[in-house]
Amino acid sequence: MGFSSFSMTLLLFSLFFLSINGQDLIYNTCKTSSQQDPNVDLQFCITSLQAAPASHCADLKGLGMISIRLTRYNITDTRCYIKRLLNNATKILDPYVKSCLDDCFEVYSDAILDIKQAMKSYISKRFFDANIQISSVMDATTTCEDGFKERKGVVSPLTKRNDATFQLSAITLSIMNILQSSLK
Ligand SMILES: *[C@@H]1O[C@H](CO)[C@@H](O)[C@H](O)[C@H]1NC(C)=O
Ligand SMILES: *[C@@H]1O[C@H](CO)[C@@H](O)[C@H](O)[C@H]1NC(C)=O
């Protein structure tokens, strides 16, 4: 496919996205996102976006903001959960697991700063910056998860959470891709 036909496809694609609403917009966005990134589960995406307040009235830009907000809640909640695991006096942690959780706490603390910056970048349409900041949130989740994998027999207590945050971030990246191609 030549460059111009590729641009044309993108353009039609974008017009399509910018002209539909509500339910269909969520479905189409999730469909695209799950195609662009195999880590994104279509059903997870739809369920998450549909459950968010006002998502049915949102346009694509609004949906992106909703997805960033969901990511931020996820990160904040997981950081709090890690803290509770570390401070749980009734449960003596394996030293290796404890060191992994310490690392996760650190990367999640940084991820909170990144997602706050991403929100600002997104609002002011600095998608390039937002992209870097969201990617760094994704890196945080994989860094956290990979720590537990380095030792046999250790099970990460954060797999589901890391996965949810990763997927929400990937959804945001897809939405920004579509928005960016529509601005060109
Ligand atoms: C993360 O976000 C998803 C989608 O909103 C939600 O289903 C899940 O419960 C959240 N997890 C945490 C730990 O906040
Ligand atoms: C602390 O650990 C115990 C034992 O695993 C568990 O039952 C309890 O729910 C934990 N408390 C918190 C606050 O996580």
Image (tube, grey):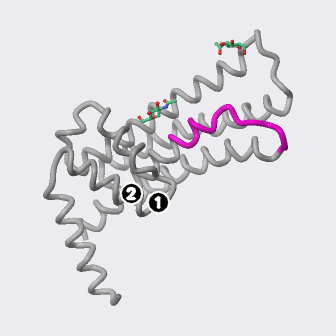
In this view, the residue in front, 32 or 4, is 32
Q: Which residue is mark 2?
A: 33
Query: In the figure, residue 95 lies in which quadrant?
Result: top right
**Proximity of marks 2 and 1: CB atoms separated by less than 8 Å:** yes
Q: Quadrant of ligand 2?
A: top right
In this rendering, the answer to whether 123 lies above or below 98 is below
Disc 1 packing (10 Å; few <14; some 14–19; many ≥20): some
Q: Which residue is mark 1?
A: 37
Q: Residue at x 73, y 31 (%)?
A: 102
Image position of 29 (left or right of 129): left
Q: Residue furthest left?
A: 19
Query: In the figure, residue 179 lies in which quadrant?
Result: bottom left
| Some atom of ligand 1 lies within 8 Å of the CB belonging to the residue at label 2 | no
Q: Residue at x 60, y 51 (%)?
A: 139
Q: Which residues are magenta?
A: 151-164
Is 154 included in the stretch rendered in magenta? yes
Report the Cα–Cα distance between label 2 and label 1. Answer: 6 Å
Q: Amino acid at mark 1?
A: Asp
Q: Residue furthest front?
A: 43
Q: Residue at x 34, y 52 (%)?
A: 30
